[in-house]
Image: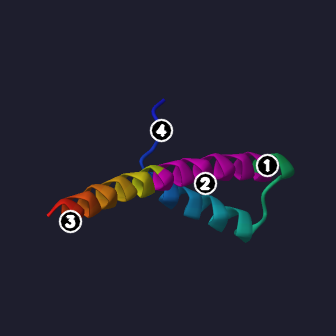
């Protein structure tokens, strides 16, 4: 199974949190949701870090172009 995109992972994480906050789940259901939430949070963090790196690279190229001009 492929990893969800950022928006999909974020939306699913919001749903996981909503279900956990609503309560009424068994311990096993709560643990499974918690674990899924942790995995989704890591996906979001990884994708945000990748986006941040791409932005930093683009900014450094722009700064080099300005310095050479």
Circle 4 packing at 10 Å, graded few (<14), some (14-19), many (20+), is few
Q: Earlier in the sequence, mark 3 or mark 4?
A: 4
Q: Nearer the viewer, mark 1 or mark 2?
A: 2
Front-lying residue, 12 or 66? 66
**Residue most toward the front?**
68
Residue 50: x, y in percent? 44, 49
Whole-angstrom CA distance, mark 3 to mark 4, is: 38 Å
* Magenta range: 30-49
Q: Residue 41: within the magenta?
A: yes
Circle 1 packing at 10 Å, graded few (<14), some (14-19), many (20+), is few
Q: Which residue is label 2 attached to?
A: 41
**Residue most toward the right?**
27
Which quadrant of the figure has residue 4? top left
Circle 2 packing at 10 Å, graded few (<14), some (14-19), many (20+), is some
Whole-angstrom CA distance, mark 2 to mark 3, is: 37 Å
- Label placed on residue 3: 4
Please state the total of marks drawn on the protein image: 4
Front-lying residue, 50 or 40? 50
Whole-angstrom CA distance, mark 4 to mark 2, is: 12 Å
Q: Which residue is label 3 attached to?
A: 66
Q: Which residue is label 1 attached to?
A: 31
């Amino acid at each position: 199974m492929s990893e969800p995109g950022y928006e999909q992972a974020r939306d699913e994480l919001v749903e996981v949190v909503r279900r956990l906050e609503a309560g009424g789940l068994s311990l096993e259901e709560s643990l499974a949701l918690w674990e899924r939430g942790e995995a989704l949070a890591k996906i979001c963090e990884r994708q945000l870090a990748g986006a941040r790196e791409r932005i930093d690279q683009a900014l450094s190229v722009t700064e080099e172009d300005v310095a050479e001009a």
